Amino acid sequence: SMEDALAQGQFIVYLQPKYRLKDRELSGAEALVRWIHPEWGFQSPGEFIPLFERNGFITQLDQYVWDRTCALLRDWDRKEYPQIPVSVNVSRADIYNADLANILLRTVHKYNLPPSRLHLEITESAYTENPGQIIDTVTHLRELGFIIEMDDFGSGYSSLNLLSKVTVDTVKLDKQFLDDTMNSEREETALTIIKYLTKMLRHLGFKVLAEGVETSEQLEMLRLADCDIVQGYFYAKPMPIGEFRTFLQEFNERDN
Ligand code: C2E
Ligand code: CA
Ligand code: CA
């Protein structure tokens, strides 16, 4: 039913806001897909993305999400909303598509957007799986003006080594990092790791984003660590586009 579902508009893009820590201002959003199935109801990506990664449908779905996201950015521009960037997820399978850069370029051009408005989240495990290919692809995409965010950083094993080989714009610390700190019996040690990891990443020229921020304690800790951007339930869960508009409008009002 995947193809029909796509044609019938059952896949819906939700947005989760990202905030700059230093002034608590909205800095962007992440596009996360949901499947509203006529019989099964609301489906979370955790339930269908792994399946689509196995059967290859993910490349089609991702392109659909990129297209809808760019259409939305264009709509916001027309309405003169603040020009925040939105990040989309780029699955491992997309990286192996030799046409990836062209598809992305066509999509942003179709909606008259500079590539820098579309941030691309590429999961860390994609880098470790095929470093040569991903480094070439990421280098090319950055030359074209896309902003690259390394997703799930710290969930794999060769993260640190990788950073000397690949240039990205932002590193997204995996949610597990924050969870581990809070549940750790050696909380001090876990805190020290986040703090110095963040400092090191910033020193290397990366922006640092922490995802999965749920508590004010975590936020305080990230502030001490000098983290740039935060995303998580503490601020807001992913929400339908219509709801996100109120976040944009509030931001606009504060801005002016
Ligand atoms: P991800 O890219 O790591 O996205 C972050 C996930 O963490 C999202 O789950 C988000 O809703 C959730 N999250 C955000 N803040 C918090 C928090 O404070 N606490 C907790 N417990 N969770 C938080 P979601 O939306 O269910 O997506 C799961 C995964 O599915 C994503 O992980 C991503 O890998 C994949 N995914 C979602 N949409 C797409 C898509 O359009 N394309 C591709 N290829 N993958 C997607
Ligand atoms: Ca992501
Ligand atoms: Ca992630």
Image (cartoon, rainbow, N blue to C red):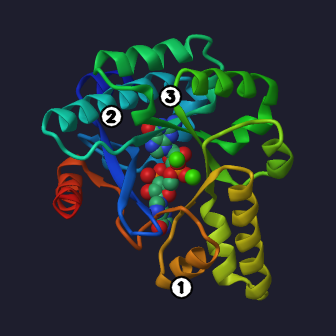
Q: Would the CB of label 2 be found within 8 Å of ligand 1?
A: no
Q: Earlier in the sequence, mark 3 or mark 2?
A: 3
Q: On the image, numbered disc 1 is attached to which residue?
A: 217
Residue 57 percent coordinates (x, y): 49, 24
Reading the image, the residue beneath label 2 is 69
Q: Which residue: 15% across, 32% down? A: 78
Q: Is label 3 in contact with label 2 (beta carbons under 8 Å)?
A: no
Instruction: Quote the CA–CA distance across marks 3 and 2.
Output: 16 Å
Q: Nearer the viewer, mark 3 or mark 2?
A: 2
Residue 247, above or below 166: below
Q: Is residue 34 left or right of residue 163?
A: left
**For this rendering, which residue is in front, 122 or 254?**
254
Query: Residue 168: percent from the left, percent from the top?
Result: 65, 39
> How packed is label 1: few (under 14 Cα within 10 Å), some, or many (20 or more)?
few
Q: Residue at x 76, y 70 (%)?
A: 196
Residue at image x 17%, y 56%? 249
Which mark sits nearer the N-terminus, 1 or 3?
A: 3
Q: Amino acid at mark 1?
A: Glu
Report which quarter residue 244 is drawn in: bottom left
Ligand 1 lies under 8 Å from the Cβ of mark 3: yes
Q: Quadrant of the N terminus?
A: top left
The quarter of the picture where the C terminus appears is: bottom left
Of pointers 1 and 2, the one earlier in the residue sequence: 2
- For this rendering, which residue is in front, 74 or 90? 74
Q: What residue is shown at x 67% (from left), y 68% (from top)?
A: 177
Residue indicated by mark 3: 58
Secondary-structure class at tag 1:
helix
- Name the amino acid, label 2: Thr
Relative to residue 62, is residue 237 depicted above or below?
Answer: below
Give the Cα separation between the discs numbered 1 and 2.
33 Å
Question: Could one spot residue 47 in this view of the protein?
Answer: no
